[in-house]
Amino acid sequence: MCRRANRIIVESQRDHYTAKIRDASGDPRHCWSEIRNTLHSTEPRIVRSPGESRKLSNDFATFFLNKLHNINTTIKQRIRCLHSDQLQSDAKHNVSVFTNIRPTTFKETLTVIRSMSSKSLPLDKIPTRALKSCPEMFAELITHSGNFFARSLIRLISATAVYLKVKYQQ
């Protein structure tokens, strides 16, 4: 019911804005004005003072921290209600799960860099054209850092598993 209502609202908005732009299509200036109104680019930008920004940021952080705390508490309560042994539903493994992971090679990383699209996204820290301009140098750096990160992550996961096993066997 809610999805249907949402779909009808979205279709209605789309039809409304399409009609406004179509009606203005004879006058480029009026058409551009309608497009800007549709994209809400004519609305005034809200500029907050540093104090207001700090308060808003703290309010967001408090809200999400409370949300995560509540989720954590709820999960812990539900787990306690379900099992006396909290790891009862976990599969028992006698061998390390990560023994078959092999490090990435320089050649693999170089192949990936060379096969990348030339387009960069705004979120990319390093533009793709920079990676492709010096692929060997970046492949060496990426391979080394990726393998270091993977080894560290595997150690962390293994240590956490041992800790949980010891903690819940008591």
Image: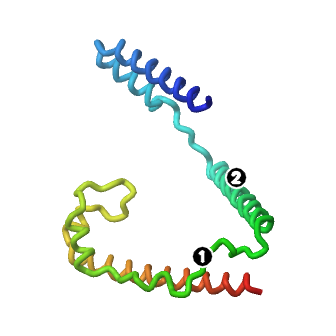
**In the picture, which quadrant includes the C terminus?**
bottom right
**In the picture, which quadrant includes the N terminus?**
top right
Contact, mark 2 vs mark 1 (Cβ under 8 Å): no
Residue 63 drawn at (x, y percent) = 70, 53
Estimate how packed mark 2 is, as few (under 14), some (14 to 19) or many (20 or more) residues with alpha carbons within 10 Å: few
| Kind of residue indicated by mark 1 | Ala
- Residue at disc 2, secondary structure: helix
Residue 62 drawn at (x, y percent) = 71, 57
Q: Which residue is mark 1?
A: 91
Q: Residue at x 23, y 57 (%)?
A: 117
Q: Residue at x 52, y 32 (%)?
A: 44
| Kind of residue indicated by mark 2 | Asp
Q: What whole-number distance in Å separates the C-alpha atoms at marks 2 and 1?
A: 41 Å
Residue 45 drawn at (x, y percent) = 52, 37
Q: How many marks?
A: 2
Q: Quadrant of residue 103?
A: bottom left
Estimate how packed mark 1 is, as few (under 14), some (14 to 19) or many (20 or more) residues with alpha carbons within 10 Å: few
Disc on res. 33: none
Q: Is residue 75 left or right of residue 47?
A: right
Q: Which one is earlier in the sequence, the residue at label 2 or at label 1?
A: 2
Q: Which residue is mark 2?
A: 59
Q: Quadrant of residue 19?
A: top left
Q: Is residue 70 above or below residue 160?
A: above
Q: Residue at x 27, y 62 (%)?
A: 128
Q: Is residue 144 above or below residue 64?
A: below
